[in-house]
Image: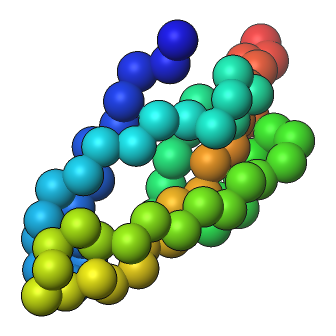
Amino acid sequence: MSKAKKFSCMQCGTPFEVYPPDDRHPTASLDKPKEASGTIKEMTFICKNEGCKHPTTLYWYRQKMAIAVG
C-alpha cells in the first residue's frame, strides 16, 4: 500500500493526509505538473475545518525518469 502524503489547506492551514489513487500515480502536487509520465489524475479535497470547507485540488502523477547520456 502507498504511503500517505501530508498537505495543508491553502485557506486555513488545517493539515490533512491523502493517499495515491493507485500505484500508477504515486506523486502529488498542488500545481499541475508539466513533466509527467503518463496520465495525471486530478482530485479535490474539501477542508474538514467546519469554519473553512475550502477545496484543495491535488494532481497525482508519475514523474518522468531522467536518463543521463555520456
Q: Is residue 48 visible?
A: yes
Residue 45, given in percent of the width and then of the height, sits at: 44, 65
Residue at 12 percent of width and 88 percent of height: 51
Horizontal placement of 43 versus 48: left or right?
right
Horizontal placement of 54 versus 8: left or right?
right
2 w.r.t. 43: above or below = above
The colour scheme used to paint the residues is: rainbow
- Which image quadrant: the C terminus? top right
Horizontal placement of 15 versus 44: left or right?
left
Quadrant for residue 61, please give it. top right
30 w.r.t. 15: above or below = below
Foreground of the two, 41 or 30? 41
Residue at 15 percent of width and 80 percent of height: 50
Foreground of the two, 25 or 64? 25
Foreground of the two, 11 or 37? 11
Q: Residue furthest front?
A: 50
22 w.r.t. 21: above or below = above
Foreground of the two, 35 or 68? 35
Residue 58, given in percent of the width and then of the height, sits at: 52, 61
Horizontal placement of 49 versus 28: left or right?
left
Numbered label tally: 0
Q: Is residue 63 visible?
A: no
Q: Residue furthest right?
A: 38
Residue 69, given in percent of the width and then of the height, sits at: 79, 18
Quadrant for residue 67, please give it. top right
Residue at 35 percent of width and 37 percent of height: 5
